Each structure stands twice: as C-alpha cells, then as structure tokens.
Image (spheres, helix red, strand yellow):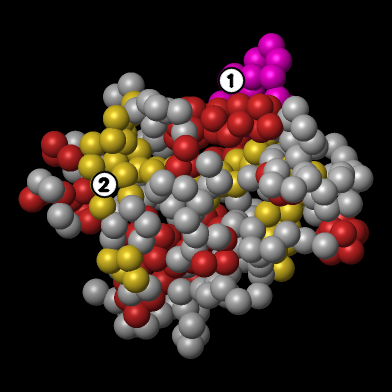
C-alpha cells in the first residue's frame, strides 16, 4: 500500500485532495452490488480503534465525487450477523477519518400494512429492543445524556428524499418519508407475538442494525440518516407458509425477490446523490453540536479521543 495511505487521516487525502466527509454504510447485500455501483475504489484499509479493528473502509470515487464506504456485515458475503457487528469500532473509525455525515442502509421487514417488500422507507424514529450490545462510548463516565430528537439528521433525510423522488420520478418502488424502525437483538427472527407487540408499540418496520449505530454516531456528533429497503413481511403480518431453503424460509412471497433486489441496488445511487447535495454545506443541525453542553462546562475538549478515553478536556 502507498505510504501516504497508511495513517487513517491520510487515507482521505489520496493525491492531496480534500478529505471526503461522507460515509456510505452498507447493510444487507452491500457485499454483492453490481459492478461499478460504487465507482472506482482508490484505497482500502481497516482502522485500529480502542474497540478493535473496524471493518474495511474504502475510498471510492464516482463521477468526480469521493466518499467512503463500509460494508457492515462483511466483504464477500453475510459474514457477521447484526448482534456481532463491532458498531463502536466502525463509528469511531469514521470519526477518526474525518467523517461528518453517515448514510446507512438497512433491510428490515414490514410490520405496517402501508409498506411492502421492495419499498424504500426513510425512518424517522427508533424503538430499541437490543439487549447485549455495547451501546455507548462513555461507559463509566459522567457524560452522554444526549437528547434523541430528531432521532436522525433532518438535513440528510431531506436530501435523501429529494434524491429518491428524482430516482423514482414517473414510477417505481413506493417511497415513504417516515416510519418507526424497531431494532431487535437477533440473529433469530421475531415471533408472531413479538411482532404484534411491536405493532402495538408503533413500529412500522423491524430490523437488527440501526441500534446502537445511530446512538453512537450522535455521541461523536456525526450526522446519521438511514435508508431502508423492505425485504419481507414480518412474522404474522401475512399468512406465509414455511418454505424450506428459501430466504427467511418463506417470509418473502415468491416473485417479489426481484423488486427487493432492485430496491437495494438503487440505494447507493440515492445515497451518493444526497451526499453530493449536502457536501460542503455547513452543518447547522443538532447532530453537529450534541456534546456542546459538555464543552461549555469544560468537561470535554475539542478532541473526541479525549471524550472516549475519559481525559477530561482532551488534547
């Protein structure tokens, strides 16, 4: 590897250009995108963090626009299920590389009858039913009481909506600009009773990946917004016979897999278009100043590494 790419901060200055500040965080299927979807990969590396190595981070360029890409579940296949993704290492690595905005994709099941497989949803709220995942950078410290409203960055969500509408102008998948995503522990799928419970709690979608990822991004003042492509009906939403060896053993109706695949493959283009739209814009959202109260009190300094290490004002 080129010497100038060995340090994380230099990964982003390939050829001396300004560092990209957007990370596309790929979910289910990110390891099997059609060739050329992400443009040209200029460099790749894993970043060493206090929580272990991150997943590989790739510097990509498409039509003159540079961004970072990370596949949450693996590089060559679904190598790691949601409970075992190292969320803290991935988000810490993003921050250390200068990322200020993350567009994440996820493939949940439909609880609401308003959505169906192949639809795109821009969730605006979360229900966290995970149990065993490290969910904060601030264990044992007196910081981290952060308001979770808006749950996702509204600036990014608006850019994603505009990009999605442009992509699907004149037809295509349904696009939903709101929805509550319930995040369960996994890797098992939910029981019918659990889905009924989640529906009564207000969930429109059920998945396994946005928590604690979104909360960790907020702790490091990174804007974060997800795009969900609906992969199946949640258990009990429709009466689906058990099909041996099929995806989710039959929770996706026959004949709808092509719509789901097509929706997944549109997400990178939508995400990149949204990232282009906000690139260079000054951030004036709550995400960018979520830790400001602690700065004003002198509890933390300008370097996020000090916040995580508990070194007071940092360096």
Circle on res. 167? 1
Element class at badge 2: strand
Which quadrant of the figure has residue 165? top right
Left or right, residue 166 beside residue 97: right
Please name whichever residue, 137 or 73, is drawn nearer the observer in this view of the structure: 73
Q: Could you say where residue 67 lies in the image, as x and y percent from the top left? A: 35, 38
Q: What residue is shown at x 40% (from left), y 27% (from top)?
A: 35
Q: Could you say where residue 30 lies in the image, as x and y percent from the top left? A: 48, 42
Q: Is residue 278 visible?
A: no
Task: Tell me which segment is drawn in magenta.
Answer: 161-174
Instruction: Determine whether 171 is above or below 25 in the image.
Output: above
Q: What residue is shown at x 29% (from left), y 41% (from top)?
A: 59
Residue farthest to the top, as pictured: 170
Please name whichever residue, 101 or 302, is drawn nearer the observer in this view of the structure: 101
Q: Does the stretch in magenta take in 163?
A: yes
- Report the Cα–Cα distance between label 2 and label 1: 29 Å
Q: Does the stretch in magenta take in 228?
A: no
Left or right, residue 14 beside residue 129: left
Label 1 near label 2: C-beta < 8 Å? no
Instruction: Determine whether 12 is above or below 147 in the image.
Output: above
Report which residue position mark 2 lands on.
Answer: 44
Q: What residue is shown at x 26% (from left), y 47% (from top)?
A: 44
Please name whichever residue, 259 or 150, is drawn nearer the observer in this view of the structure: 259
How many labels were placed on the picture?
2
Instruction: Determine whether 154 is above or below 276 in the image.
Output: below
Q: Could you say where residue 125 lies in the image, as x and y percent from the top left? A: 71, 53
Where does the C terminus fall, quadrant-wise?
Answer: bottom left
Element class at badge 1: helix
Please tell me whether mark 2 or mark 1 is closer to you in this view: 2
Dot 2: few (<14), some (14–19), or many (≥20) neighbours within 10 Å?
Answer: some
Q: What residue is shown at x 34% (from left), y 80% (from top)?
A: 309
Which quadrant of the figure has residue 278? top left
């Amino acid at each position: 590897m080129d010497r100038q790419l060995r340090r994380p901060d230099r990964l982003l200055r390939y050829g001396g250009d300004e560092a990209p500040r957007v990370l596309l965080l790929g979910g289910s299927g990110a390891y099997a995108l059609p060739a050329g979807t992400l443009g040209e990969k200029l460099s790749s590396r894993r970043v060493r963090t206090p929580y272990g190595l991150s997943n590989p981070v790739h510097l990509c360029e498409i039509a003159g626009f540079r961004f970072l890409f990370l596949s949450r579940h693996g590089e060559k296949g679904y190598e790691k299920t949601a409970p075992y993704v190292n969320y803290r290492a991935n988000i810490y690595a993003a921050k250390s590389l200068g990322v200020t905005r993350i567009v994440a994709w996820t493939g949940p099941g439909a609880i609401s009858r308003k959505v169906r497989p192949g639809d795109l949803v821009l969730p605006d709220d979360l229900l966290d039913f995970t149990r065993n995942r490290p969910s904060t950078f601030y264990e044992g410290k007196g910081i981290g009481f952060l308001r979770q409203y808006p749950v996702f960055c509204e600036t990014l969500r608006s850019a994603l909506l505009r990009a999605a509408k442009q992509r699907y102008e004149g037809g295509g998948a349904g696009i939903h600009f709101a929805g509550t995503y319930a995040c369960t522990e996994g890797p098992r799928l939910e029981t019918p009773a659990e889905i009924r419970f989640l529906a009564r709690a207000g969930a429109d979608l059920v998945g396994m990946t946005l928590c604690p990822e979104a909360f960790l991004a907020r702790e490091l003042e990174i804007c974060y917004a997800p795009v969900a492509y609906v992969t199946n009906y949640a258990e009990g939403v429709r009466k689906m016979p058990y099909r041996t060896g099929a995806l989710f053993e039959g929770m996706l109706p026959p004949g709808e897999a092509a719509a789901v695949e097509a929706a997944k493959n549109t997400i990178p283009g939508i995400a990149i278009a949204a990232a282009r739209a906000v690139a260079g814009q000054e951030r004036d959202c709550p995400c960018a100043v979520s830790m400001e109260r602690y700065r004003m009190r002198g509890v933390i300094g300008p370097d996020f590494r000090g916040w995580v290490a508990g070194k007071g004002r940092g360096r």
